[in-house]
Image (cartoon, rainbow, N blue to C red):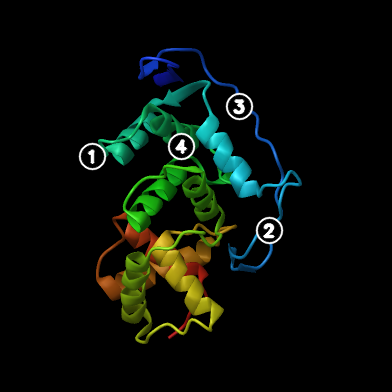
Amino acid sequence: MSATTLRRVSSGGGYIPSIPLIWPPTNNIGFTGEINGVGGPTNGNGNGMSEFEAEARMIMNFDGILQLSAGNAALLNNLISGQTNLSDKQRMALAFFIQEGTWTSRKLGAGERAGVLNSYLRAFERLPLDVEDWEDVVKISSGRWTKKLNKKAEENAIAIFTVIYKRLPNFSNERDDAAVKLMAYGLRPGSRNMNSERNSLSTFFSIFNRLPRQTADWDIVRAIAYSGAIR
């Protein structure tokens, strides 16, 4: 399989061919406060910043050599299609996250990491730009509540919630809250339950009379599978 190897040019912009990156994962992380693998805060890393911030800075500050597989190059190109204002640094960060990931996101695989970025784009109507944005990307990949919120995304999720559960969400119920957050921001579960996902696919089909096709559809499937919300 062919590959695209990239190195960001320090002056003049663009990418030039180079040699593959060898990237060892670092940092171990503990999670607390989960609802079916989705939810609460994480421990810090002992150096004054959260694990999420450390990983976000690693993504944003990467300025080395990256070998992007043909498949992952296609994922990147699909993601940034129509995004005309991205800098080289932003493109490299996106490529790095898809190709290599971070310690907390590598379990997903490149295709699902690209899916996380698509969920972020859908929720916030733009791709990540700064450290706080990338913290939220890592949080989405780890099933954690994002720091930034988007009223429109949550209103859309509430509308879908009422279609699925035939009622409005009760935000004092942590499972209803989880369902809305899963649909609004595309949070990925800490661990997957394939039986739950198969059942949620059947539920999705019975409600919408079609299989999931888009990022938003799969975010709905995960909400049904992992939130624990009921009618």
- Identify the mark nearer the N-term, 2 or 3: 3
Q: Which residue is mark 4?
A: 98
52 relative to 130 in the view: left or right: right
Q: Which residue is mark 1?
A: 82
117 relative to 109 in the view: left or right: left
Label 4: how many Cα within 10 Å (few below 14, some 14–19, many 20+):
many
Residue ID at (51%, 65%):
195
Label 1: how many Cα within 10 Å (few below 14, some 14–19, many 20+):
few
Q: Are marks 4 and 1 in contact (CB under 8 Å)?
A: no
Which of the pair 112/136 is nearer the observer?
A: 136
**Residue 200 in the image, given as x and y percentages of width and height:** 42, 69
Foreground disc of the pair 4, 1: 1
Residue 31 tag number: 2
Rounded to the nearest angstrom, the CA distance separating label 4 from label 1 is: 18 Å
**Residue 53 in the image, given as x and y percentages of width and height:** 60, 46
**Residue 48 in the image, given as x and y percentages of width and height:** 71, 47
Q: Secondary structure beneath disc 4?
A: helix
105 relative to 209 in the view: left or right: right
- Identify the mark nearer the N-term, 1 or 2: 2
- Identify the mark nearer the N-term, 2 or 4: 2
Rounded to the nearest angstrom, the CA distance separating label 3 from label 4 is: 13 Å
Label 3: how many Cα within 10 Å (few below 14, some 14–19, many 20+):
few
